[in-house]
Amino acid sequence: MAQRFGTGPARLTPKAPTNNESTEEQTIMGADRGADDESSSESEPEVVPVAASPESGPSRPSKKKKKKRSKIARAISVLKGDDVPQAVVDQVVAKVKEEHGENSPVADEDAVREVLKQLRLKDVAEGKVGFGGKNQKDTGDHKFWATQPVPHYGDEAPEEDGCIEPSRPREEVRQDPYPLPKDFEWSILDITEPPRFLREVYELLSANYVEDDQAAFRFQYTAEFLEWALKPPGWHKEWHIGVRVSSNKKLVAFISGVPIHVRVRKRDIHAVEINYLCVHKKLRSKRLAPVLIKEITRQCHLMGIFQAIYTAGVVIPTPISTCRYYHRTLNVPKLVDVKFTYVPRDMTIARMIRQFKLPSTPALSRAGLREMEERDVSAEEDIRHHFLSGRGSGEKEASTGRRSGQVVWTYVVEVKSANARHHRLLLVYALPSTIVSHPRYNLLEAAYLYYYASDTAFIENADDLGLLKRRLSELASDAVIVADQAKFDVFNALTLMDNPLFLQDLKFGSGDGLLNFYLYNWRSKALAGMSATEDKGAGRGVGVVML
């Protein structure tokens, strides 16, 4: 089963990217490049050159030179033919259409593919990626994923959804844990007792988890956040798997799974959400990630779960959907100072502050906006379930109640009329990021749009009449105000659910981060993310928010 390659804290990109910007350069890479890096072939041993003797006639190229030429030839051969993943081409074409219009002459698949090939060849030649570069997996063939039951590049779109491999009875599942490298041992972490287990996970993730490309920001999952995220209803301690050093019992790797009920089009699946794969930075060469993935796969199979959902900032075989991060600036001076965003050429910080200034009170407070209470749980769960049932690939079974430590802000709007009560639901969660090596700030306070719902969606023709967009825009606008009042620096959202309806109107800017969604052991046609599909508008193919 596969892990979540968490996408690092994305940055706010300028509106007009330069012509030589590569979509691959914009993708935020996970700090642990995961199983695909660690499962790639080992580096070849160096060949010592043999000098030709004077009597041997004309000198011949040394073996070392031959090897260098061989690497270049291999790099060029990789770039020949239809080798750029279709998912990457689709992402670039969608971005071009977004920036220059649907009928732009440059929004051509063949032209985009050729440009990507040239950019990759340039990066290989400069040693940035590929053979001899730091991102060798970019031109690799994903050897680990070739062994997994996931859709592969070149596969035709399936006519019907369904599993790739059949489920197996428990007695046919491997009963013993997979072997680890010498000096390491497995550890099942019961994060309820003793408390040090949760602290160990927090410390491992804080120092070694997802960073952005420039290593300037790193997700900082608090202990309260992890307790909330790792303990939804029905959670299993066997799905919280660690690796320790045998000699001192130090936790050096971790992967987690939590139960989730996923709906892929009209098919309901009991699955697992894979998350928080993390290997200590000094142990990335030990190839622990593939073993972690196989072990959590085994544990899930033992409990009768054979499908999973996970996300990645990188493209691996094969995304079911791709969403883009959008950011709403709140604390302008701080975001500019830490280089999360930049002051445009025709702008000053003072003008930016005025541009992003927000009201002091949520607009819906006059209509009954308030924090959720116990008495609201039943009604709000019902409306959320029905709202999401027509929007996307999944929904969590976790409760939407308030959590300690202010991890989640949950609000409801209950409007009473003569004939009925109308409900709206709004959830926002907090996930800060460490600011690495900044002289003034050490934490970026970020809020994320989680879930929302409105019974306006059930009104006939509400979408065509613009009623749904107006209602959701009101909710999202107040979510931004709530985040601003809570002293967050930035408010983030993805192009999923109905978010594309209101992101630009609410002054969200396009970020440089893409998040790819994957299903393990399940085939399906692509779902609408940042781009629309034949049957769904943009965003409406994805209805699950990965923490």
Image (cartoon, rainbow, N blue to C red):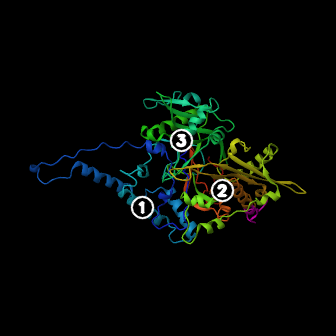
Q: Is residue 408 left or right of residue 121?
A: right
Please give the residue where the numbered disc 3 appears in the rendered image: 277
Could you tell which of marks 3 and 2 lies nearer the N-terminus? Answer: 3
Q: Secondary structure at mark 3?
A: strand
Q: Estimate the spatial distance between the alpha carbons at disc 3 and disc 1, rounded to whole Å.
A: 30 Å
Please give the residue where the numbered disc 1 appears in the rendered image: 119
Could you tell which of marks 2 and 1 lies nearer the N-terminus? Answer: 1
Magenta: main secondary structure equals loop
Mark 1 neighbour class, 10 Å CA radius: few under 14, some 14 to 19, many 20 or more: some
Q: Please name the residue shown 44% across and 61% down the image.
A: 116
Q: Give the residue type that dot 3 points to.
A: Leu
| Residue 530 can be seen in this image | no
| Residue 453 can be seen in this image | yes
Please give the residue where the numbered disc 2 appears in the rendered image: 540
Could you tell which of marks 3 and 1 lies nearer the N-terminus? Answer: 1
Residues 393 and 312: in front is: 312
As drawn, which residue projects farthest toward the front? 440
- Estimate the x, y position of residue 299 in percent, counting from the top left: 57, 33
Q: Secondary structure at mark 2?
A: loop
Q: Please name the residue shown 78% across and 60% down the image.
A: 460
Q: Mark 2 or mark 1: which is in front?
A: 1
Q: Is residue 57 left or right of residue 489?
A: left
Residues in magenta, as a range: 459-470
Q: Give the residue type that dot 2 points to.
A: Arg
Q: Estimate the spatial distance between the alpha carbons at disc 3 and disc 2, rounded to whole Å.
A: 28 Å
Residues 231 and 13: in front is: 13
- Estimate the x, y position of residue 373 in percent, counting from the top left: 79, 45
Label drawn at residue 503: none
Q: Mark 3 or mark 1: which is in front?
A: 3
- Say above or below: 261 vs 9: above
